[in-house]
Amino acid sequence: MSKKVKIILATLMLLIVIGGIWTCGGSGSKYKVTYESGTVQKRDISSSVTATGTVEPVTKVEVGTQVSGIVSKLYADYNSNVKKGEVIAELDKTNLLNELASAKSNLASSKSEYEYQLKNHTRMKTLHEKQLISDNDYESALLSYEKAKNTYETNKNEVNKAQTNLGYATITSPIDGIVLSREVEEGQTVNAGMETPTLYIIARDLTDMRVIADVDEADIGGVEEGQRVLFTVDAYPNDTFEGRVTQVRLEATEESNVITYEVVISAPNPDSKLKPGLTANVTIYTLEKNGVLSVPAKALRFTPNETLVGPEDQILDCEGTHKVWTRDGKTFKAHAVETGISNGSLTEILSGIAEGAQVITDAHIGQMPGGSHANAGTGSENQERSPFAPGPPGKKKK
């Protein structure tokens, strides 16, 4: 027998049993239907996703050096407050000063050669114009002049380069901020041949922080800029911090076959409690409306039918895509409603039913007292028992 046939047979048997409850039992049935209800009232509706992230400064700069050398002096340490342009380190300048002196010497020599060749070229040009020298002699003088000029220009650039490198040996802070990390010690050699070595990491302002949260791919679709965020950190378990989504980054990150996206969250830190590197437990409110008329979402899924109403009950249906039901005595009445947002638990009602109305949310088929399978809460007076069993306390057998 196929799975589909089994499901159909099971459904038919269930309908037969439920139908028998009402058909055979009638008004005197041992079974009854109880209804759950909810109130149409104003509530706050919200939906959220959770993630973890890391607290970090909004602006963080790695300060390095473009020249190699020995660290001669360090003027800033961990947690030092520094100003833009302030000297925070110096490299040994001996070799750089020698390079500058050599470049200046070469420049002076090439300048003398250039000035001589310039005068010679001018003189040879005058003689050539008077046809007193051959073309070959003039072209030779012109070539010597151009070579001397190029050498002179090159040596001027070398002097500028040596002066610039000497300036790089004095390290200054690029921003106003606080030193988060010092990566070198005095006397340490740094090599800028392959990459720029980091000397310090400086944060601009620790009163203005941010959280970089990793949001799962299943949740990222509802996250947008401007949404409210609450987060906590283990360092202050009793404090809740608030921020806003400022950026949803498009680049995906895969780790252990899990895809996440980085979400940037503002984290104002006026009390300086938040420290760089803290782990944040983040709640992003992807849906949020306060004080809106709403009903439990399952009220929109309830529909009375012959298995849930008695033979004397009346169903008054209506046209509408979304409906909620009220019950007045033995009358079930449908109300066509216009819905708004929903978080799966509550649904906003825009129109169709008044505040304060009681709507049916669910129905349960139970057993009337005295049934052969009475609920645990049924009174002992109506429970069936063995004639050989002792009677209830305080009563005599007849």
Image (cartoon, grey):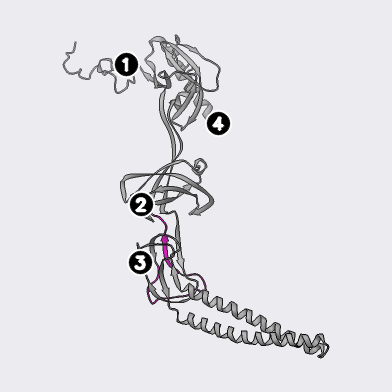
Which mark's residue is nearer the viewer, 3 or 1? 3
Question: At 74% from the left edge and 87% from the top edge, which residue is drawn?
Answer: 123
Task: Inspect the image, locate mark 2, and give the three-letter code of the amino acid beneath it.
Answer: Leu
* 258 over 13 or under it: above or below: below
Q: Magenta segment, principal secondary structure?
A: loop
Which of the two labelled residues, at mark 2 and mark 4, occupies the earlier sequence position?
Answer: 4
Q: Which segment is the magenta one?
A: 183-205
Mark 1 surroundings: few (<14), some (14-19) or many (≥20) residues within 10 A = many
Nearest to the eye among marks 2 and 4: give it. Answer: 2
- Within the image, what quadrant is residue 361 found in? top left
In magenta stretch: residue 203: yes
- Residue behind mark 4: 4
Residue matched to label 3: 77
Residue 88 percent location from the top left of the image: 40, 68
Query: Rounded to the nearest whole Å, what is the CA distance between mark 2 and mark 1?
Result: 62 Å
In the rendered image, residue 82 lying in the magenta stretch gets the answer no
Q: How far apart are marks 2 and 4 (CA)?
A: 58 Å
Check the image and report above or below for 206 versus 70.
above
Please name the residue that numbered disc 2 is placed on: 274
Label 2 vs 3, first from the N-terminus: 3
**Quadrant position of residue 206:** bottom left
Type of the residue with mark 4: Lys
For marks 4 and 3, give the one nearer the viewer: 3
Depth check: 43 or 161 in front? Answer: 161
**Mark 1 or mark 4: which comes first in sequence?**
4
Q: What residue type is labelled 1?
A: Pro
**Between residues 122 and 270, which one lies in front from this camera angle?**
122
